Amino acid sequence: MLDQGGEAAVTLRAVAHQVGVSHNTPYRHFTDRAALLAGVAEKDFAAFSVEFDEIGQSDRTAIDKVKAALRTFAYYGESHPARYRLLFGDPDIAKRGGQLEAVAMTTFASFASLVAGAQAAGYLPAVATPTMTSLIYANLHGLLDLRAGGRMRAEKGFIDVLDSAFLLLDLLRPTMDRASKCAT
């Protein structure tokens, strides 16, 4: 329902109707609509963590693991724009706290472990991993927001969400490594 009609389409009554139960049944599981939406967000954040952990276990290079995680975010934002806005753009969800915050922080930590691996391999600068992770995270989410709002245009210098995010990774690569790569 969220994917097809946006957040406004999701009410406890509509959910009950969709799954064929009485209109009071959802209240046995969720105190209100906000709790239902938080449950959706928790589920999706948990899925990101699983995906990032699987990426971390793959045989990709450290920087390719970060790129794979960024592709996961970009695909999700493109395929599920309303859920993407729920997770990364809804201030009520952001300040909810509790289990939702714990799951969201686990997702951030899973992504941060990929960033830490790229830092250890010399692909990204050796600054505080949470800071580097936040920079990459904010860049991608900003690019996705620009695209969703129709503000990503070539005449402004934008290329593509992932190409732009990957360019940032290249620009962040420690200078010594770039210089030695150019010499070869």
Image (cartoon, rainbow, N blue to C red):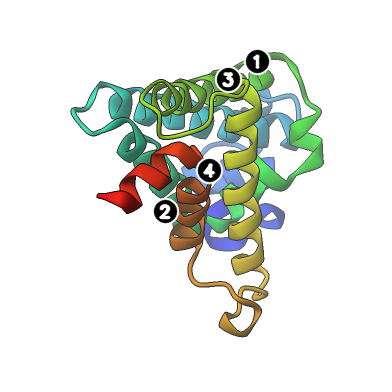
Q: Can you say whether 167 is above or below 66 in the image?
A: below
Q: How far apart are marks 4 and 3 (CA)?
A: 28 Å
Q: Which residue lies furthest to the front in this view?
A: 183
Q: How far apart are marks 2 and 4 (CA)?
A: 23 Å
Mark earlier in primary sequence (2, 3): 2
Q: Distance between the residues labelled 1 and 3?
A: 6 Å
**Mark 2, residue position:** 75
**Mark 4, residue position:** 172
Q: In which quarter of the image is residue 142?
A: bottom right
Question: Element under label 3?
Answer: helix
Crowding around mark 3 (Cα neighbors within 10 Å: few <14, some 14 to 19, many 20+) is: many
Disc number at residue 99? 1
Disc number at residue 111? none
Is residue 13 visible to us here? no
Q: Can you say whether 137 is above or below 141 in the image?
A: above
Q: Which x, y percent locates residue 116?
A: 46, 22
Question: Element under label 1?
Answer: helix
**Mark 3, residue position:** 103
- At x 63%, y 15%, the residue is 102
Q: Can you say whether 72 is above or below 131 in the image?
A: below
Could you tell whether 19 is left or right of 141 in the image? Answer: left
Q: In which quarter of the image is residue 49?
A: top left
